[in-house]
Structures are given as structure tokens and as C-alpha cells.
Image: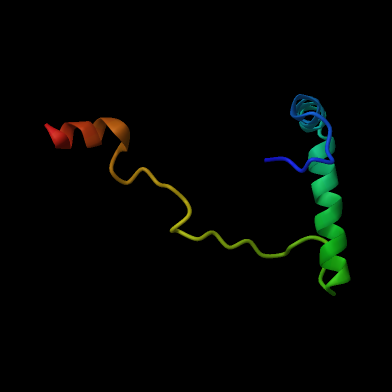
Amino acid sequence: MMPHDLPNWSTVKTYFHKLRRDGTWERINDALREKLRQESGREAEPSVLIVDSQSVKTTEKGGFAAMTQARK
């Protein structure tokens, strides 16, 4: 499902993994995020982090072992 104007998928995949492994991909994302934040009038780095309890998985049930015991 890649656009037709890109190279063969295996070539793209190889470059992506190489860029991810050496940290280039993360540096590109960091630079783009900082630029976008500055262009929208905000600080380059976020000052607040909000963790939504609906999106963070916990182990309240005691993990897989506790769940399988309850089923017996």
C-alpha cells in the first residue's frame, strides 16, 4: 500500500531500518516536531506530559497467570 512513486518496498524497508537503527529517524522526527511547535507559537519542547489511564495497560489482575487461574 505504498505510493507508486517510491522505490521497491524492500529498498524502502532497508533504508527505514538502517535510519531507525542509527538514530537518524528519531532525530528527523524530533526536528520536525520542534519546528512545528515553534511555527505554531509554542515552545520547542513540551513542558507537560499527560498519561491517559485508558491508554496505559496495567497489571491489576496479576498478569496472565492470574487470568488463567480464574478461568479454571
Residue 34, percent across and down?
Answer: 84, 58
| Residue 49, placed above or below residue 3 | below
Quadrant of the snapshot with the C terminus: top left
Residue 45, percent across and down?
Answer: 79, 60
Colouring scheme, one of rainbow, by chain, secondary structure, one colour: rainbow
Judging depth in this view, the residue of 12 and 3 nearest the camera is: 3
Quadrant of the snapshot with the N terminus: top right
Residue at point 81% right, 71% down? 42
Residue 54, percent across and down?
Answer: 43, 58
- Tell me the quarter of the picture where residue 35 sits: bottom right
Q: Is residue 5 left or right of residue 57?
A: right
Judging depth in this view, the residue of 19 and 70 nearest the camera is: 19
* Farthest-out residue, bottom: 41
| Residue 46, placed above or below residue 68 | below
- Tell me the quarter of the picture where residue 4 sits: top right
Q: Is residue 1 left or right of residue 7?
A: left
Residue at point 74% right, 62% down? 46
* Farthest-out residue, left: 72
Count of numbered marks: 0
Residue at point 30% right, 33% down? 64
Q: Is residue 58 left or right of residue 72?
A: right
Judging depth in this view, the residue of 28 and 16 nearest the camera is: 16
Residue at point 85% right, 45% down? 28
- Tell me the quarter of the picture where residue 49 sits: bottom right
